[in-house]
Amino acid sequence: MANKKILIVDDDPDVRHGMQVRLQANHYDTFFAVDALSSMVEARKHEPDLMILDLGLPAGDGFVVMERFKIIPALAVIPIIVVSARDAHANKGRAIKAGAKAFLQKPVDTAELLAVIRQALGEPAHSQKPVVYDLGSK
Amino acid sequence: MNEKPLQVLVVEDNAGDARLIREMFSKERRDSFELTHLSRMSDAVIHLANGGVDVVLLDMGLPDEHGLDTVRRSLAAAPDVPVIVLTGLDDEELAAKAMKEGAQDYLIKGQIESRALPRALRHAIERHRLQTEADLIRTHQMQFKDEFLSHVSHELRSPLTAIYQFVTILLDRLAGELNPEQHEYLEVVLRNVEQLRAMINDLLEVTRVQAGKLTIELQCTSLSDAIAYSVNTLEGAAKTKGIALSSEMECRLPSVCADPTRIRQILIILVDNAIKFTPPNGTVKVQARMFEEDPNFLLLEVSDSGCGISPDMTERIFERLFQTSDDPASAGRKGLGLGLYICKELVTRQGGRIWATSALGQGAVFSVTLPVFSLARLILPALRKERRTEGSITLVVTEIASPTGWLSDEERAEHSHGVRDLLQRCLHSDQDVLLPKMGSAGAAELYFIVAVTDGIGGEAITRRIHEQLDGYEYIEQAGLTVSTSYWSLEAIKRNLGESMEDFLDKVAAKIQRLINEANSSRMVEDG
């Protein structure tokens, strides 16, 4: 079975890179975008199964991205997980309302991120043991 | 002088008093004041709303409004226009109340010195201007502080994210094997990342406390979920330290009126602290039961076998930035000293109390009380604010139940949204459907309460609601009609399978019928 494709939209190159290493280790193919415009271009090009979206982006924030994706049928079907450093109290409800499947606060716990991704992709929870460091094992 | 004349609105229904006031201005230069005289509050409100008035001279006994409401209506129509009230000789007490409502000054009829009147007007305008300016500056400062802190926390979280990501990548050996020493050092980094993350969150929370922006959404909520959540979350940390973490709950405890996410937050802080201050092989226990001193409250206790708190410190620990002095069990790092302060704010804002009992070396018990859920408690503030004396408020209660008596936030949101849509279809478009929260209420015809119950049947809840509402004068004054309708989440799901539209139409018709019945029975009573 081909790997699922995830588009990572974040303007911080280190965060993008870290996310890429983690997701590839969990058998996902990853692509990048850095702002509202490139997220649309990359989403068209790669037809991802899921998008991980930061809110604080240059030239149009994550909410703008969600608005634009919503009106284009080909992009509207892509499930979105918002991963943001912005305050959860002020932004979680708004993000969910805008169509996001989940809002995760940075720095996001790896196990939680993988669980939410699997859920959004409709994958069974335990189909594959996630590659994640288990704090309980020490 | 090129300045425009000051526009004075005189609202006075007594022709004699009005003439007196006009005469007092006759000695002033004609280009310094311009008087408009109206004798009804309703006309004054329209005039004020049109703008252009600099100051209002307001009689507090008008044909269509009386007392403090004259001031309220004037300020509601034009918040920027200062009001001076005109009162009778024996009404100084009322005048003082008017000042509390926002009037700038009061003048006693019959004792107004003609030279003093223009001066009083100018003073009122000037004072009002200074107040408005000060308010504006304060608002800007608060806004700046909020924006600054939210910006800073955002900027701190981003690099922290990258550190967390790559440390865990190394620990998970995604970049190759580690020797034991490397592994150990990276674990130290990870622990500190976690501390930094918690501190940033605490900082933000404290800013919210101080700005009065702590969001608390009271609802009918069960303590057992919060206890299970906190114990699950911190089980790992307790195990690592060799501490036995356990919980105990009296069965069939009633629900509390609280914010479930805030209860979880409170418990996490208290249990985390307990683990921190308890030496290895100790115990930490979370308990919930009825509060013996007051049956309207539940008691939540977090007890530990740790080093305890000296009696003179049991109150001070809730102060902001308080930290314990040298304490071997907490091992060096102390945090910001904000946890218990946040806890206290959260508990108090939910109508409860928090205190600690302890003796040095004998462990500590943190006790939290939370009000038992009562529908009356939830809607009383709203009704009081409305102060309705006519018309009616219809209360539609819907029960959401699930086999476990527990709903996820998503399910709850989804369901509330659906029901709100539904109710709006039953009403005229200008009516509002309100999900009441303590302290917030608009002018709504219909209060809609979502009660999450642990499987208590429909009849029992109706009885409970009626019992709770019985004897509250505000509710009687408001002419409240209670209608209850029930459908469980399961029923909705089942029915949605057939046809969403049909199902909604059916329920809409049912609610409309309930509302009609309530209205017609009231009409019979009125007639």
Image (tube, coloured by chain):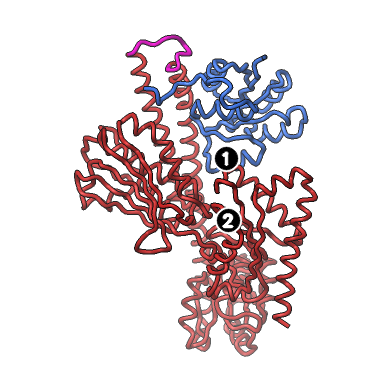
Q: Callout 2 environment at 10 Å: few (<14), some (14 to 19), or many (20+)?
A: some
- Spatial separation of the CA atoms under disc 1 and disc 2: 23 Å
Disc nearest the viewer among 1 and 2: 2
Q: Dividing the image into 4 quarters, which one contains the N terminus of chain A?
A: top right
Chain letter of the red region: B
Q: Which residues are magenta?
A: B171-180
Residues A40 and B29: in front is A40
- Confirm whether residue B55 shows in the render: no
Instruction: Give the amino acid at mark 1.
Output: Lys
- Could you say whether the residue bearing mark 1 is in a helix, strand or loop? helix
**Rendering coords of residue B401 (x, y %):** 60, 51
**Colour of the chain lettered A:** blue
Residue hosting label 1: A92
Residue B451: image tag:
2
Residue B246: image tag:
none
Tell me if residue B176 is in the magenta stretch.
yes
